[in-house]
Structures are given as C-alpha cells and as structure tokens.
Amino acid sequence: MSETVERWSSRRAFILAVTGAAVGLGNIWRFPYITGENGGAAFLLLYIIFVALLGVPVMMAEIMIGRAGRRSPMMALSHLARRAGATPHWRWVGLFGAITVFFILSFYSVVSGWSIEYLVSAVNGSFASRSPAEIGASFDAFLADPLRMTFNHTLFMLLTMSVVAAGVSGGLEKLNNLLMPLLYIILVILAVYATTTAGFGQAISWLFTPDPGAITAGVVLSAMGHAFFTLAVGACALMAYGAYMPDHQSLTRAAVSVVVLNVAVAILAGIAVFSVVFTQGMDPAEGPGLMFVTLPIAFSELPGGAFWLGGFFLLLLLAAWTSSINLAEPMVSMLQGAGLKRGQAAAVVGVLVWAVGLLSVLSFSSMADVHWFAGMTFFAWVTSVPPSIFLPMGGVMIAIFAAWVLPNEIAARALDTSPGGFRLWQGLVRYVSIPLMVVVLLSGLL
Ligand code: PHE
C-alpha cells in the first residue's frame, strides 16, 4: 500500500484532533470513579507520574511511527520494519491495537449512550422534582432496560460512524474544531461552580493528600492503564492520526501540550464531581455509576441544578464523540488498507462494534449472571482488562519498536527535534519507560 496523502490542514488541527482523542469519557467518567475506587490522592499521584514518565515519551513514539510510515498502523509497522531490516511480523502490533480499540469502542458507545439518555433527562428537568432514592432507582431501572440502552448505543454509533465515514478533513477536523473549545468553556464553568459548594474543601484534600498505605500492585497497574487510556496511547489509534500529521510540526510540543491539557481536564472534572459528591455526603467508591447516580441527585438539590447537569452531560457527550472517532480510526484505516472504501470500512466496523456493545448492554439485565472472566460480567471485564492490560502491552511493543528497532535516522527525522532532544527521548523510552511498563505489568498480573 502506498503512502496516505491526506493531511491535517494545520498544526492547530492536528493538536485539536489529538486532544479530542485524548480527552473523553476517560477524563470525565472513568477518572473520577476509578480514582474513587482506588482511594483518591495516591491514585492521582501515581497517574500523574505515569503520564509524565510513560505517557509523553510513548505518545511521541506512537505518533512518530505513524508519521514515519504514513500508512494505516499495520502497514506502517510492516513497511518500517522492512526498511529497518527487521521482521514484518511487527505488523501484528497494529492488529493487536485494532482488537484493543474494538473492545474499548464497544463499551465506550454504550456509556456514551448513557450520557445521551441523561442529557435528555436533565434538559427535560426530570431530576428536578425527584428524591435521591428515586433518582438512584431510575438509574437502576435504566440499566435494567436493554431496549432503551440499545437505542442510545445505536444513536451514538451512528453519530461516530457518520463522522468517520466522512474522512479526515471532511469529518474529523470539522467536528474537532467546533467542539473542543466549547468543551473547555463548560468545564471551567462547572469547576468554578464547584468552588462555591460546601464539599469543595473535602474534595481538594481527598484528591491531593496521598495516603501511601493505599498503594498496592493492583492500584499501580490501574493507574498505569488509566494513563494509557486517557492519553489514547497503546492501541495505535494515535499512530493512525500521526499518518496524517504534516511534516515540520514539532511532535514534542504537540505531545506535551496535549498531555498537560488532558491532565488539567481530568483534575477539573474530578474537582467538579467530588465537590458535589462530598457536599451530599456520598460514597466516592460508587463505581461506574458514580457520576450517573450522584450528580443528578446532587445537582437536583442545588440552585440551577438542571442547567448545570445538562451542561455536564453535554460536555461528556462531546468529549466522548471526538474520542470515539479516534477509537474507530485504526480499524477503519486497516480495512481501507485491505481495499475497502472509507464508507464501507466505517459501516463494517460500526456494525461489528455495535453488536459486541450489546454484550455490555445485556451485562446489566439478562447477562448479569454470565461471568465472562474471573467472576466479571462482560461489562466489568471490558471496562478493566483492555484498558489496564491490553493498552500497556501495546505500549511496550510500540516503544520497543520505536526506540530499539527503528533506525535512528528514520526516528529522528519523524520526531523532528534537535539531536539532543532525540537522544533524551530515546534514552527515556529505552531505559525508563520500557522497564517501568514491564515491571508494573508483570507485578500487576502476578
Ligand atoms: N482517551 C480516551 C478517553 O480518555 C479513550 C481512548 C482510548 C481513545 C484509546 C483512543 C484510544 O476517553
């Protein structure tokens, strides 16, 4: 397959697209609940350490491979491996990435469907006149209703796949340009609002006073997995976007700015969620339902609640949308590489992912007692194992390829930094990121 000719139209468009991929349910839905389940500040601290030591260098490695290969991830890897005189079997890393995003997108669409449901309910004011017990019960009733969930899941898949089918400049760029700035505005308003609530002080100390005793191998593994998940690293999804990155754009600057913004969004979302949780004396370790149960209860008792809640779910939906189009990209570009037209590839991926998503939908009703793996429902498995284990595994392989296999001159040219910057990046990946990922993965798995 020859080089892709599509390019992002500007530097800004590329940064917006990568930010759009990174900022999503991971920052706004998953970060608060997983931080809650893992004890708060210690998890946050580990997450920030992993983002700095692994997220930045491995993200650079991944985008760099895409830019050097200028093909779909599988094709880019086998093409570059050949040029490096290595085995073309490296392309299976691209396939592994496609499998990873396949599973992630399947639950991503279901949870995004929850936010469609909740956006509509918030705007209708359905939460305003209800007691906390009624609101909690209505989430359970929603989960137990596979038809309603399937409807929302289907709607979200259609939204995603129609943008993906429209292509890089026609679809992805326009959506990103339009939505991302709006998202930050809503988030800042929500965080400012949180400072006026009674639980704000408690939320801050819970998020920022680490308890070293809370750190276990499992917590460390989840924190590392979450760093990969939230940065969209490890599944070749950013590699697919890197293929469209213009020459002569600093990859370092792009990666650092995306990472900083991404962490800032997670912390702002955490402050917004936990301030309200503590104001209402609720449990931070509530699980995946955390924001869907606690926020409507909390906001319903606060002035202007319906408005803020609607804003929150709108934000979540927009963020999820720009991430889901990135999740689809490795699969779609892979099928395009196999000869399908973009629209056809999007349709095939959409239907398959949608079908597997139904297993997540049913995990709360008819399949609630079906244990997919180690006593977990399909939903519990798919929201933990692919993000916490598959992504870091992909990250290790991508990092080894970029820092050990790819010849220096190819890597340095695609990274586009100074010689000193290149050596720093390579040293960090070789001697810090790779060993750290391997140690955490092994200790977490054993
Ligand atoms: N980064 C996205 C989020 O935080 C999820 C994602 C993971 C997107 C992997 C692309 C690849 O929600």
Image (tube, rainbow, N blue to C red):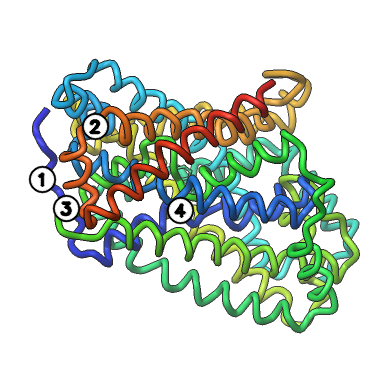
Q: CA distance from mark 2 to mark 3?
A: 23 Å
Residue at x-position 62% and y-position 50% = 47
- Nearer the observer: mark 1 or 2; the answer is 2
Mark 1–mark 2 distance (CA, rounded to whole Å):
23 Å
Mark found first going from the N terminus, 1 or 2: 1
What's under tag 1, amino acid-wise? Val
Image quarter in which the C terminus is found? top right
Instruction: Quickly name the residue at label 3.
Output: 7
Indicate the quadrant containing the N terminus: top left, top right, bottom left or bottom right.
top left
Q: From what the image shows, is residue 223 above or below residue 382?
A: below
Which residue is tagged 2? 406
Residues under numbered marks 1 and 2 in contact, where contact means CB atoms less than 8 Å apart? no
Residue at (40% x, 60% y) in the render: 256
Name the mark nearer the viewer: 4 or 2.
2
Residue flagged by tag 2: what amino acid is it? Leu
Q: Which quadrant holds residue 197?
A: bottom right
Neighbours of disc 2 within 10 Å: few (<14), some (14-19), many (20+): many
**Marking on residue 22:** 4
Residue 82: image location, x then y, percent: 16, 22
Q: Which residue is mark 1?
A: 5
Q: Quick one: SS at disc 2?
A: loop
Alpha-carbon neighbours of circle 1 within 10 Å: few (<14), some, or many (≥20)?
few
| Percent position of residue 184, x then y | 50, 72
Q: Quadrant of residue 365?
A: top right
The reply to whether dot 4 and dot 3 touch (C-beta < 8 Å) is: no
The reply to whether dot 2 and dot 3 touch (C-beta < 8 Å) is no
For residue 34, above or below residue 198: above
The answer to whether residue 151 shows anywhere in this view is yes
Under circle 3, the secondary element is: loop
10 Å crowding of disc 4: few (<14), some (14-19), many (20+): many
